[in-house]
Image (cartoon, rainbow, N blue to C red):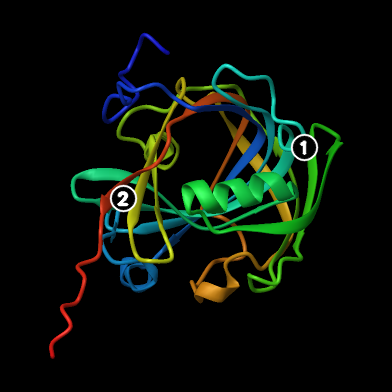
Amino acid sequence: MQADRGHRAFPPPRRPWVLAQSWCDLLFAHWSVPAAMLREQLPAGMAPDLYDGRAWVGVVPFRMRGVRFRGLPPVPGAHAFPELNVRTYVMVGETPGVYFFSLDATSRLAIATARRWFHLPYFRAAMDVAPEGDGFQYRSNRCDPRGTAASFEAHYAPDGDVFHARRGSLEHWLTERYCLFSVSSDGRLFRGDVDHAPWPLQPATAEISEQTMVTAYDFPLADAPDSLLFARRLDVKTWAPRVVYRPVAKVRRT
C-alpha cells in the first residue's frame, strides 16, 4: 500500500485486496459531451460527474500485465492481454467513480471472470498492439456476438515529460479514480475499489484512423479528442465488488 494518500478522494478499504495487475502503455483519449446526453445513458442510481459543467467520455487502450489473485502466481491464460475500455465518470451518492460502457479484451478467461464476478460488460475482440517508433500501433475489432460491432485503430505515443496531475486539474479529475460501478442483470449496483500510486502521466499524441467504440451511444464526438494523456505503467490492487444498491422489489397484488 502507498503511504501518501493525498492523491485519493477517499481511503482504500480496510479489508484485503484480492487481485493485482499492471496497466501498461496506456492512452487516455477523452471527449467532452453534454451532461444531459450522458444522463440518458446511465443506469438507475448513477448521476453524471461533471467537470466545469461538462461530462466526459474516454476511450482507453492499454495492455494488461501480471494479473494475479492475492497470494498466487499470475493466472495462466489470463495474466497478459490487450484491453480497450470505453468509460465515463459518475457519482453514486457522494462517491465519485468510473462507469464502463464496454471493455474489450482477448482473454476468454478474463472476460468470463470479469462478467461473472465484477458484472462488467466485457466483450471478446481481435486485438493487436505493436511498438512503432516512439509509440504503439493499436488495433481492435470486436468479435463478440453479445455486443454491437465496434473497432478502434490508432498510433499513439508519449510527447513530454512524466508528471503527476495537480489536484483540481482536469488531468487529475479524469485519471485519479479509485472505484468503479457496475450493474448486474437483476439491477443490483456494485462498487469495486482499486488502489495505486498517483498516475505517472505524460502528454500524448494520437493519430486515430478508426474509432467506432462509442457509436452506439450517439455522443457528438469531435474527430480529435479534447484531452490526450499517456502512462507507461501503473501497478494496481483491486478489491472484490460489493452491492451498494438493490432495486426495490415490486409487491404483487392479488
Q: Quadrant of residue 224?
A: bottom right
Query: Which residue is painted at 54% across and 21% down in the image?
Result: 70
Q: Is residue 244 above or below residue 12?
A: below
Could you say whether the residue bearing mark 2 is in a helix, strand or loop? loop
Q: Is residue 139 left or right of residue 27?
A: right
Instruction: Measuring from the top left, give residue 152's x and y in whole percent.
Output: 72, 59
Q: Which residue type carries mark 1?
A: Gly
Mark 1 vs 2, N-terminal side: 2
What's the residue type where badge 2 is placed?
A: Tyr
Residue most toward the bottom? 254
- Does residue 34 appear in the picture of this structure? yes
Q: CA distance from mark 1 to mark 2?
A: 39 Å
Residue 73 lies in what quarter of the image? top right
Q: Residue sitting at 37 percent across and 27 percent down?
A: 166
Q: Where does the image place residue 135, in percent across and percent down from the top left?
A: 77, 36
User: Which label belongs to residue 187?
Assistant: none
Which labelled disc corresponds to residue 77? 1
User: Where is mark 2, residue-wise?
Assistant: 51
